[in-house]
Amino acid sequence: MKMTETQFNLIKKQLRDLTSRECFYKNKLEGIDIEQIQSQEDFEKLPFTWKGDLRDAYPLGLQAVPDEEIIRIHSSSGTTGTPVIIPYTQQDVDDWAEMFARCYRMAGITNLDRIHITPGYGLWTAGIGFQLGAERMGAMTIPMGPGNTDKQLQMMMDLKSTVLCATSSYALLLAEEIAKRGIADKIHLKKGVIGSERWGEKMRKRIANELGVELYDIYGLTEVYGPGIGMSCEHSCGMHMWDDFIYFEIIDPKTGEPVPDGEIGEIVITTLRKQGAPLIRYRTHDLSRVIPGECPCGSPFPRIDTILGRTDDMVKVKGVNIFPSQIDAMLSAIPGASSEYQFMLDHLNGKDICTLFVELDAGIDREIMEKIIGETFKAKIGIQVNVKPVSIGELPRSEKKSTRVFDNRY
Ligand code: ZN
């Protein structure tokens, strides 16, 4: 992606500003002469900011303005240790509301809609973000928060909610309950706005069909405002990113170098206007790619693909990056192959060896499938793999996210 002149100027101003007073980035960028940064290429030499840096700044080390300007904090979930605290100024909250309202409009949602919000309210940014954007747009919000399915469905019927905001798993749960209770004719939903976790095509179709809604993907993360920094449009071909508020790069997570447009890599974000806790080159660990060209909707905002996974799931073999969602997609297009697989990497006699165990439907010819899957893998993913077909149920199942990629090389 080419950085625009406006973006460059905003970044430069921000860098000057941050290095001229005591704050997180004054320390982080110590020894770097900001005036030497003359181009996008110079900018791309600046060090990355990692989630670990943000954790080390706990509790308020990221705060970049005086106390009297901070009106709120949010926090990312502390599942892996110390949480990250993000302070917000009034302008940050207003900017977030503006971006979120833009998301709703991108989905054709208006102030006549009734927006049923099921993500949680509180320290994390989900529920309150959906609320802010809807209020900014002037729509009626129904601030449900998660849980209590009986009440959710009652309110949905009585208030004639037209937009459901949810995670994909909660949307599926509600869809199944509506079908089970036979109340589909009392539900008025038209659209669903779904948070940006990785979710398969099959799940998407089920939710859309059972709820009878159009689905939209929304992107965001607590460290960078929250949900609402990007949104898919009616053409469902990726998410438009609000590049007047954030600058994003797609990089090779292993080398840190930018990848060409269209290639998959890690999303790295620089905020352009954020005051409370600005971020420079923040590693999101989310995998996506730039979708080149213009969107049929005509929006000038650049697009990235729906989130394809996390960098932690990715392995590099013979110079090729491989991650689970690619293998998911490849197998789902092969009749007779199930969705269950394990990808093993070993290092033997100086060579990387890849083995793919795949469960096959009963009665399928294993030899033919070995050949088909091997050739498809080579064509789609670009490397040679030994295919080992197994029967349905032979690979381990997990309640949580199953591990599918095993790197035994080191
Ligand atoms: Zn579009």
Image (cartoon, rainbow, N blue to C red):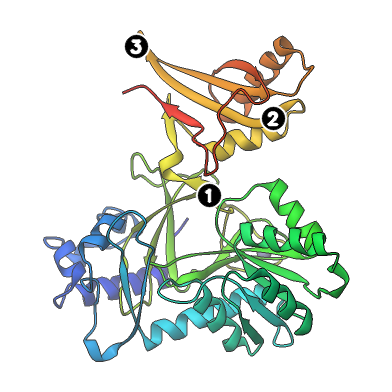
Answer with the quarter of the image where residue 166 lies: bottom right
SS label for mark 1: loop
Give the label, 1 or 3, closer to the camera.
3
Q: Residue at 70% of width from left, 78% of height from top? A: 109
Q: Nearer the viewer, residue 18 or 329?
A: 329
Q: Is residue 400 above or below residue 232?
A: above
Q: Residue at 51% of width from left, 72% of height from top? A: 120
Crowd around label 1: few <14 · some 14–19 · many ≥20 (10 Å) = many
Q: Nearer the viewer, residue 399 or 39?
A: 399
Mark earlier in primary sequence (2, 1) = 1
Label 3 sits on residue: 350
Q: Measure the alpha-carbon separation of dots 3 and 2.
A: 32 Å
Mark number, residue 338: 2
Q: Measure the alpha-carbon separation of dots 1 and 3.
A: 32 Å
Q: Residue at 70% of width from left, 63% of height from top? A: 174
Q: Is residue 407 above or below residue 115?
A: above
Mark number, residue 163: none
State the quadrant of the C terminus.
top left
Confirm or deny contact between disc 1 and disc 3 (CB under 8 A). Answer: no
Q: How far from the left and from the top, in percent, is residue 112?
A: 74, 87
Crowd around label 3: few <14 · some 14–19 · many ≥20 (10 Å) = few
